[in-house]
Amino acid sequence: MNEFMALDRNLKLRTLTTFISTLLTSSVLPNMTIYYTRYFGAGITGMLLVIVSILSFIAGLYGGHLADTYGRKPLMIFGNGMLTGGFALAALMNSQLIKSPAITFCAFLIAGVGGALADPAQQAMMIDVSTPRNRQFVFALLYWVNNIGVMIGTALGGWFFRDYLFQLLLALVCGGAINLMIINFGMDETLKRAADKSGSVWSALHAYFGVLTDQRFVIFLSGYVASSIITNQPSYYLAVHLQEKFATIKMLGIEVYGQRMLSLFAIINTVMIVLLMSIFTAIGRHLNLRQEYSLGMGLQTIGFAAAFLLQSFWPLVITAVVLTVGEMFTVPASQTLRANIMNPARIGAYSGATSAVKPMAAIIAGSLLSISGLLGQGGMAAAMLILGLLSIFLTNKSARMPATFDSNY
């Protein structure tokens, strides 16, 4: 508690806004695929989600540059304003007055782009006001708060999404309005001096050319892509493996089959993080960041590789515990290492480049799933081990390299 109270006010308020936004969005957004499928069909829904991903990806990159040009706070207000406005439109389109799935999609598209624009500025603000001494604690705290929000929000969505969508959307609007007030009246601008650049697309491209000339950061991002492919597996090969290979059992009169086993992975993960994160954060402080990341990534890699080879309940439960322990070491260490090697003059652009990792990793994870029939269980397990070793090697290499900032960007 003393460590939390010693944090900069922006960080304390960011913890609150993270909890509010995660709690409410987790109750609605994961279920919107079901909503779209009901009205548009699976084929069109897939294309719509691709459109959202592409536009959010572009908005995240552009938002990173704008955060360095105009400041963190103005972009956070603008992006969260779009987010709240999109939710308000979605609520109106699902009220007793009117029902329009097409406009609802447009509303969520506006909200998604707004959130993507604001995200690099929010990341940059946290790095601006944290220090190398407390940064690991800050990222661990936000990770813990985020998981609590996901746990409660998912439960709310499961109970109320079908019958009370309008009310949930109104809650999103209220939460967005509260966050806007917190940002506007409670947070301070943290960018000491705006970059001497314009907000044009060409200026943004120029800024990202500068990021790509930073060899150390590019090596780190390559390792981050490799690790993200592994951590994406619950949505890709692990789901298919459990569906096809898991040996169905009955426990306490409840049938546990592949899909339920996958849900149990998520439950074990979330409950462990909520209950034990502070303990593993304290343990991690006895290691340097490279050691902590290597230990965590090693455990995650072994956990996923083993899960691809196993088919029975209790061994799979053990792998879920192992990879979750690894995650609790890896996430704060990775985020702290990333923040420590960013160019202080271009933190927004560096944060924007980081936002490109997850879509890239998702594409590669999907490609691996497509060829998993050829690789088999053993081949997929071996692929995870190779990716894990590659991530550990590249991350450690980048952490040991000297800064390579190009002053021309």
Image: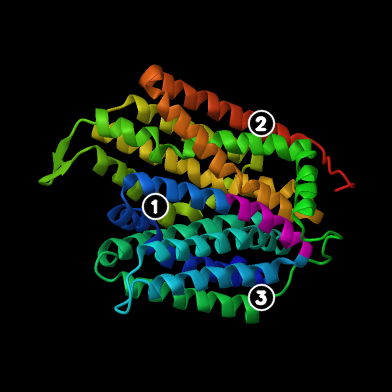
Amino acid found under the numbered disc labelled 1: Thr
Report the colour scheme. Answer: rainbow
Q: Residue lying at the far left in this picture: please name it.
A: 253
Disc nearer the start of the sequence (2/3)? 3
Q: Which residues are magenta?
A: 57-69
Amino acid found under the numbered disc labelled 3: Met
Relative height, residue 293 to residue 129 (above, below): above
Q: CA distance from mark 2 to mark 3?
A: 36 Å
Q: Which residue is mark 2?
A: 394
Tag 3: Cα neighbours inside 10 Å, few (<14), some, or many (≥20)? Answer: some
Q: What is the magenta segment's predominant secondary structure?
A: helix
Give the percent coordinates (x, y) of residue 31: 34, 57
Tag 2: Cα neighbours inside 10 Å, few (<14), some, or many (≥20)? Answer: many
Disc nearer the start of the sequence (2/1)? 1
In the image, which is nearer the foreground, mark 3 or mark 1? 3
Q: Quadrant of the N terminus?
A: bottom right
Image-quadrant location for residue 148: bottom left
Give the percent coordinates (x, y) of residue 54: 55, 48
Q: Is residue 124 left or right of residue 206?
A: left
Give the percent coordinates (x, y) of residue 16: 53, 71
Q: Residue at x 38, y 32 (%)?
A: 237
Residue 270, numbered label: 1
